[in-house]
Image (spheres, rainbow, N blue to C red):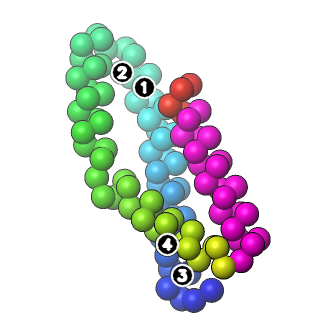
Amino acid sequence: MSAVTAYVAAAALLGSAVIGGVFFAFSSFVMKALARVPASAGIGAMQSINVVVLNASFLGTAVLSRYLRRWTMLNTVRAIAAIAAALMHALGLLANSIG
């Protein structure tokens, strides 16, 4: 693994961990807090959150992961691990969105 790939992997890992923490916090207490306010206020707050969350810092790990995907395709074991991680991430997103 080259130094650039190692730094990109570390940044992608850190970014994914931060996003995981955001999802955890959101489902742990933000949604519970929104459930306590009147529906109109909760809807307004949720719409505001949806506008603010779509920014480069939140979506940046997707770009890093894309680079890593190309690197992992050079080795079958890494490719299987990357695909498994992507599937777990997608399932986690679905479980958090539905549940």
Residue at (46%, 51%) from the top-left corner?
19
Q: Residue furthest right?
A: 77
> What's the amino acid at mark 2?
Leu
Instruction: Give, as a single range, the part of the protein colored magenta.
Output: 75-95
- Which label lies toward us, 4 or 3? 4
Residue under pointer 1: 31
How far apart marks 2 and 4 lie (CA) works out to: 37 Å
Q: Which sits earlier in the primary sequence, circle 4 or circle 3? A: 3
- Is residue 10 among what the camera can see? no
Residue type, mark 1 in image = Met
Question: Disc 1 and disc 3: Cα gap in Å?
Answer: 37 Å
Task: Assess whether mark 3 and mark 4 are in contact (beta carbons under 8 angstroms).
Answer: yes
Does 64 appear above or below 35?
Answer: below
Q: Mark 2 sits on what residue?
A: 34
Q: Earlier in the sequence, mark 1 or mark 3?
A: 3
- Tell me the residue that label 4 is attached to: 67
Q: Say which of 17 and 81 sits in front.
A: 81
Q: Amino acid at mark 3?
A: Thr
